[in-house]
Image (cartoon, coloured by chain):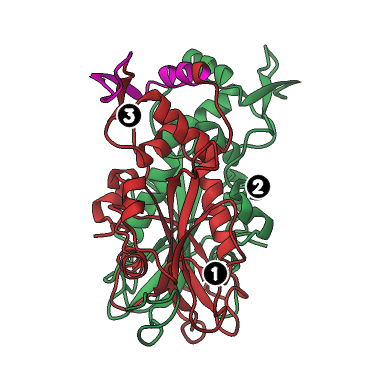
Chain colours: A green, B red
Amino acid sequence: MSSAPAHEPAHEPATAELAVSTVIFALHAEPSSELPSLWLPLVRRTREPFEGQWALPGGWLPVDEELGKAAARTLNETTGLTPKYLEQLYTFGALDRSPGRRVVSVVYWALVQSDEAARAAEGENVRWFPADDLPELAFDHNLIVDYALWRLRTKLEYSRIAHAFLGETFTLAQLREVHEAVLQRPIDPANFRRTIEASKTVIATDEYLAGTPHRPPRLYRFDSTVHSANGDPADLGPLGRATPGKAS
Amino acid sequence: MSSAPAHEPAHEPATAELAVSTVIFALHAEPSSELPSLWLPLVRRTREPFEGQWALPGGWLPVDEELGKAAARTLNETTGLTPKYLEQLYTFGALDRSPGRRVVSVVYWALVQSDEAARAAEGENVRWFPADDLPELAFDHNLIVDYALWRLRTKLEYSRIAHAFLGETFTLAQLREVHEAVLQRPIDPANFRRTIEASKTVIATDEYLAGTPHRPPRLYRFDSTVHSANGDPADLGPLGRATPGKAS
């Protein structure tokens, strides 16, 4: 017997349907809370299945659209958000994730700065929710968010996460607040300063935070030789040349 | 205007077809070469498109089969390999990757030990190739292998890579050889020992390598509190509970 060749149908091609979804995290400070926390935009479903429940922004993959472009387009159509870069997170294909049909969803994600999140549309059917306190979402979207949160908290170095949430320059206190928000626990400022300085991922500038009359804190920037998360196509290695997940 | 709801078709569901492929890396020492190097199994295509060219093991996704199970099954059918764990690598969906039709491929990967690779089938239509010196493959499979190599060399900590290629216990020289093979450059033994000891990822055992009469080298094992690559469902975080990529 000869081996079955690669990519030859042993039966009719699959009839699983392809969709894309996006998880967009932003930092958001509630007046009632000490630490800022991670929030994400959700879209209310207006049809079955899961009518009335909240779901990640997304939609079907058109046969003539790149995966990353479909994710960016459907995100923009529902929320008005246009992150400069979407990264592929994971593809979800469990048999029972959508009732009555097989849907495989390629999920993209991005971290956006608060000012971009503030510009996003909100309305009856689009709302931001705290990532750690979500209602029961449509499909397996709670699992998708859990996985994205886990990736954010365990897989990325702290400096790379923080890079995506902050501007070009920042104080060490601002950087520490990002870490506190992602990890959801207070961090000792002196320990944090020592750890960051030892990591050599940030560089002190000659500038100081404006608008602080007494002992203004120094501004830092990230060492550009260290890769950033979400914002650097080079972080995809060979795929960066083809930029398959590039949003625009 | 109201926002478009999530996951509602604005047109007919996509007709992109879904396939799975696998990249399996093993270490292989050629007598002519000083360092062992990374090899992977390929399958020769016996039909158009790309008839006669080599391709990654894979096939269509049946509508009733989990993604990881389809990857494991098609890998086994073509190569006889059954890695204990396949990890999802990336989903490739460029418009032009398959002539005349839209095919989206969910790619899985695994690192296997040499003894498992040696048990794999080889024949006219299945053969192992050096990962750094491949012929022109079918579809975008050269790009997929390049991406897998880049992930292996830049994204995983060395200890986690080595864990997947070695047995339960190993000498520091064996561990160094794995690193040399992946990075394809010699590493100074004394520097390597210092780096590994400082990383605290390996633990010295009370055992020594058998069959070495004079000053047998000590055996080490990995610290099990450090995550392993390819072999630990817990490494998928929340997904590990559902083990969506589990091969069996």
Q: Are marks 2 and 1 in contact (CB under 8 Å)?
A: no
Q: Amino acid at mark 3?
A: Phe
Q: Quadrant of the N terminus of chain B?
A: bottom right
The residue identified by callout 3 is: B170
Q: Secondary structure at mark 1?
A: loop
The residue identified by callout 2 is: A234
Report in which chain the residue with disc 3 lies: B
Q: Residues within 10 Å of mark 1 (few under 14, many from 20)?
A: many
* Residue ID at (56%, 22%): A199
The residue identified by callout 1 is: B93
Residue A142, position as x, y percentages in the image: 33, 57
Q: Secondary structure at mark 2?
A: helix
Report in which chain the residue with disc 2 lies: A
Q: Which residues are magenta?
A: B191-215
* Location of residue B159 by image quarter: top left
Q: Earlier in the sequence, mark 1 or mark 3?
A: 1
Residue B56, position as x, y percentages in the image: 47, 65
Q: Is residue B211 magenta?
A: yes
**Gap between marks 2 and 1 measured at Cα:** 19 Å
**Gap between marks 1 and 3 measured at Cα:** 40 Å
* Location of residue B41 by image quarter: bottom left
Q: Is residue A236 above or below residue B134?
A: above
Q: Secondary structure at mark 3?
A: loop
Q: Amino acid at mark 2?
A: Ala
Residue B244, position as x, y percentages in the image: 30, 59
